[in-house]
Image: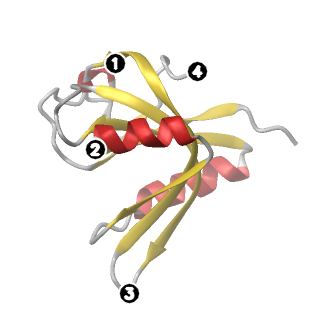
Amino acid sequence: MAVDRLSSSCIYTLLHSGRLREQAKEGGRQELTERNKPWRRGSQLWAEAERACDRMAIVFAGADDTEPGLIYWAVIDDITINEENRSTTCTYTNVRPIRPPKPLSALRLLKSGRQLSDADIRPYRICQTPSFLV
């Protein structure tokens, strides 16, 4: 069965823009490990999207501020939580640029619908999937 629809929720996180550029150039499957941060709700939402035959997006801002705002996105393949060391490993495919980059305020938190602040520095947020992802 073809899976081509994005779920209504996505995960926003930070990664160095140079690494994102490399991942976009390499293509294929990539991996991010977030230490001391179990993405429990994100993992649950991803599993729900999978059951509904939807894809879930991960949206990236640069952790280094060389490129402001939302600069890349990908489709999540898997989210695995290691409860022992409280880490999360997220694998994703097809990192692609967001052109033009969007401000962080283009994202809305899933729970409240509140816009993210353009100064937000939290490395993990669950948001409503924005319409500019295609």
Q: Which residue in the protein does label 4 denote?
A: 134
Q: Which residue in the protein does label 2 denote?
A: 16
Label 3 element class: loop
Whole-Å distance between the Cαs marked 2 and 4? 23 Å
Q: Residue at x 59, y 40 (%)?
A: 27
Looking at the image, tell me whether mark 2 or mark 4 is earlier in sequence order: 2
Neighbor class of circle 4 (other Cα within 10 Å; few <14, some 14-19, many 20+) is few
The three-letter code of the residue at mark 2 reads: His
Whole-Å distance between the Cαs marked 1 and 3? 37 Å
Whole-Å distance between the Cαs marked 3 and 2? 26 Å
Neighbor class of circle 1 (other Cα within 10 Å; few <14, some 14-19, many 20+) is some
The three-letter code of the residue at mark 3 reads: Glu
| Cβ atoms under marks 3 and 2 closer than 8 Å | no
- Pick whichever, 100 or 56, lies toward us: 100
Q: Quadrant of residue 37?
A: bottom left
Q: Residue at x 36, y 37 (%)?
A: 60
| Quadrant location, the C terminus | top right
Looking at the image, tell me whether mark 4 or mark 1 is earlier in sequence order: 1
The label nearer to you, 3 versus 2, is: 2
